[in-house]
Amino acid sequence: MYGTITPLFPGLPGGPEVLVVLLILVLLFGANKIPKLARSTGQAMGEFRRGREEIEEELSEMDNDDEEEEEKTTTSTSTETSTETN
């Protein structure tokens, strides 16, 4: 008797949902400020991405340094052991 009820935001927003969100944005901020908001949001995302990449590089460098120290320790230990047996 009744049709199925679909939620307003079931997953990713589609056509009508996007229009509702855009209308609310225009009402809240005005048409002139929306491009400025979008630009500043894009710049913030770029800064976040650069910061994340820098941290990932530092972590990988630290990991490589740890591996090199382990190799040096293993090499020096095996050299000491071989000289002691002679």
Image (spheres, helix red, strand yellow):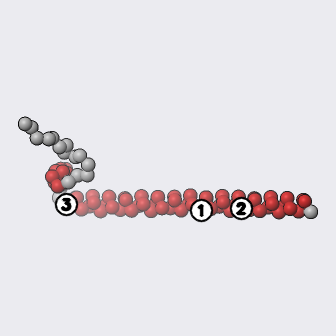
Q: Which residue is mark 1?
A: 61
Q: Nearer the viewer, mark 1 or mark 3?
A: 1
Q: Which residue is mark 3?
A: 32
Q: Nearer the viewer, mark 3 or mark 2?
A: 2
Q: Earlier in the sequence, mark 3 or mark 2?
A: 3
Residue found at x 86% / y 62%: 82
User: Callout 2: few (<14), some (14-19), or many (20+) C-alpha neighbours within 10 Å?
Assistant: few
Residue 26 visible somewhere in the drawing: no
* Towards the viewer: 12 or 65: 12
Q: Earlier in the sequence, mark 1 or mark 3?
A: 3
Q: Which residue is mark 2?
A: 71
User: Callout 1: few (<14), some (14-19), or many (20+) C-alpha neighbours within 10 Å?
Assistant: few
Badge 2 marks a residue whose secondary structure is: helix
Q: Position of residue 79 (x, y in %)?
A: 83, 63
Q: Place residue 46 in its image quadrant.
A: bottom left
Q: CA distance from mark 3 to mark 2?
A: 60 Å
Q: Nearer the viewer, mark 1 or mark 2?
A: 2
Residue found at x 35% / y 62%: 43
Q: For residue 75, which numbered disc appears in the image?
A: none
Q: Earlier in the sequence, mark 1 or mark 2?
A: 1
Please indicate whether residue 81 sits to the left or right of residue 69 in the image: right
What kind of residue is marked 3?
Answer: Asn
Please indicate whether residue 16 sits to the left or right of residue 50 in the image: left
Q: Position of residue 22 (x, y in %)?
A: 18, 54
In this view, which residue lies farthest toward the left? Answer: 1
In this view, which residue lies farthest toward the front? Answer: 1
In this view, which residue lies farthest toward the right? Answer: 86
Q: Place residue 40 in its image quadrant.
A: bottom left
What kind of residue is marked 2?
Answer: Glu
